[in-house]
Image: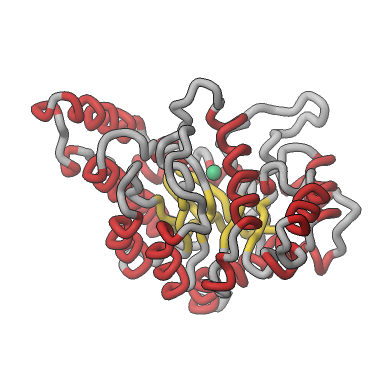
């Protein structure tokens, strides 16, 4: 099987964005605030947006199953208060759940959380529980910076986040560390803020001792781990300066990197530097970089081509990247697949 662990519903029907715009208008003028029930999207509309986009590309490129979460840049946790985020997260998660029900062989859900700047992460737990227990979701996206580029939350090793981690361990779900839209003009959302956040999260994990408290906690750092693999010597050296264990003992039992790196040399570097056990196949297709690379004639986000072409992986190692590691990182995914004899 080929499991893409990083997909978002970037192609949701326009009605979703229109509802969200009304919700944002309703923050200033409560008379304009729409009810959740005013958003009406039919199964046929959901089917159409998936069949002509993600599913079509999955078939063309040869992947079988996508872990599917709400559009990351639309999470925008900095907008409004907890109630605004809570209603919005519930709507977006439910749509991903409906997609997974319509296409049970091809999609399985991961949740966005109703985070809000300055609000205790504990407030996210009811939505998390609903998504795991009722929807069968297998992971969450955790935003380390709900302020959208101003970094007002404590670092990921801080006890501030522990209520979420306790639930993750209880339910055996990993978190992809994933920021949302930047509202800081200095940081382009997908070109700077995303990659900064991946790198920042990795360094925070080096600085802390989080996995001493949570030996079973698992994180996925997306977009190839930001700058971490490219600067692996720097991070090994910093861990040494900070008197931390070797990175393989300090972090690599708990941290995975995905393959959302959009060119061959990047994947060659990732697969050379990072142990194969820590790499998860992903494309984040129809996401930040939708174009065709004139140097190859293929879509930048057609990442399977780079995994196939790299000389660093044997057939058995490719199996780990495509499937085996995902089953380890996402135990509920493994269980759901085994239930279906897959
Ligand atoms: Zn993403």
Camera-side residue: 86 or 292? 86
Q: Is residue 243 left or right of residue 22?
A: right
Quadrant in the rendering for residue 193: top right
The answer to whether any part of residue 319 appears in the image is: no
Q: Quadrant of the N terminus?
A: bottom right
x%, y% of residue 11? 45, 36
x%, y% of residue 200? 60, 44
Quadrant in the rendering for residue 97: bottom left
Camera-side residue: 232 or 285? 232
x%, y% of residue 183? 44, 27
Residue at screen point 17% across, 38% down: 38
- The quadrant where ligand 1 appears is top right
Residue at screen point 48% across, 47% down: 144
Residue at screen point 25% across, 29% down: 24
x%, y% of residue 4? 61, 54
- Which residue reaches farthest left? 31
């Amino acid at each position: 099987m080929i499991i893409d662990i990083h997909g978002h519903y970037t192609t949701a029907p326009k009605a979703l964005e229109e509802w969200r715009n009304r919700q944002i208008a309703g923050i200033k003028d409560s008379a304009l605030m729409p009810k959740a029930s005013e958003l009406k999207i039919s199964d046929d509309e959901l089917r159409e947006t998936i069949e002509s986009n993600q599913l079509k590309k999955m078939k063309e490129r040869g992947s079988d199953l996508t872990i599917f979460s709400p559009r990351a840049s639309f999470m925008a946790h900095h907008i409004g208060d907890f109630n605004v985020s809570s209603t919005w997260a519930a709507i977006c998660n439910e749509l991903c759940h409906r997609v997974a029900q319509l296409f049970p062989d091809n999609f399985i859900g991961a949740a966005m959380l109703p985070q809000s700047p300055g609000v205790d992460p504990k407030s996210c737990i009811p939505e998390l529980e609903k998504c795991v227990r009722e929807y069968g979701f297998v992971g969450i996206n955790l935003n380390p910076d709900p302020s959208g580029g101003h970094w007002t939350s404590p670092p990921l090793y801080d006890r501030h986040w522990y209520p979420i981690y306790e639930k993750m361990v209880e339910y055996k779900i990993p978190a992809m560390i994933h920021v949302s839209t930047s509202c800081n003009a200095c940081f382009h959302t997908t070109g700077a803020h995303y990659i900064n956040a991946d790198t920042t999260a990795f360094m925070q994990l080096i600085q802390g001792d989080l996995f001493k408290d949570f030996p079973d906690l698992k994180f996925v750092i997306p977009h190839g781990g930001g700058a971490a693999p490219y600067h692996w010597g720097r991070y090994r050296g910093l861990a040494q300066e900070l008197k931390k264990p070797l990175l393989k003992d300090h972090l690599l039992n708990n941290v995975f990197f995905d393959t959302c790196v959009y060119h061959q040399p990047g994947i060659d570097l990732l697969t050379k530097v990072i142990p194969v056990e820590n790499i998860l196949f992903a494309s984040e297709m129809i996401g930040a970089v939708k174009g065709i690379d004139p140097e190859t004639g293929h879509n930048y986000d057609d990442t399977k081509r780079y995994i196939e072409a790299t000389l660093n992986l044997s057939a058995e190692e490719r199996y780990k990247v495509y499937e085996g590691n995902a089953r380890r990182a996402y135990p509920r995914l493994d269980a759901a697949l085994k239930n279906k004899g897959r």
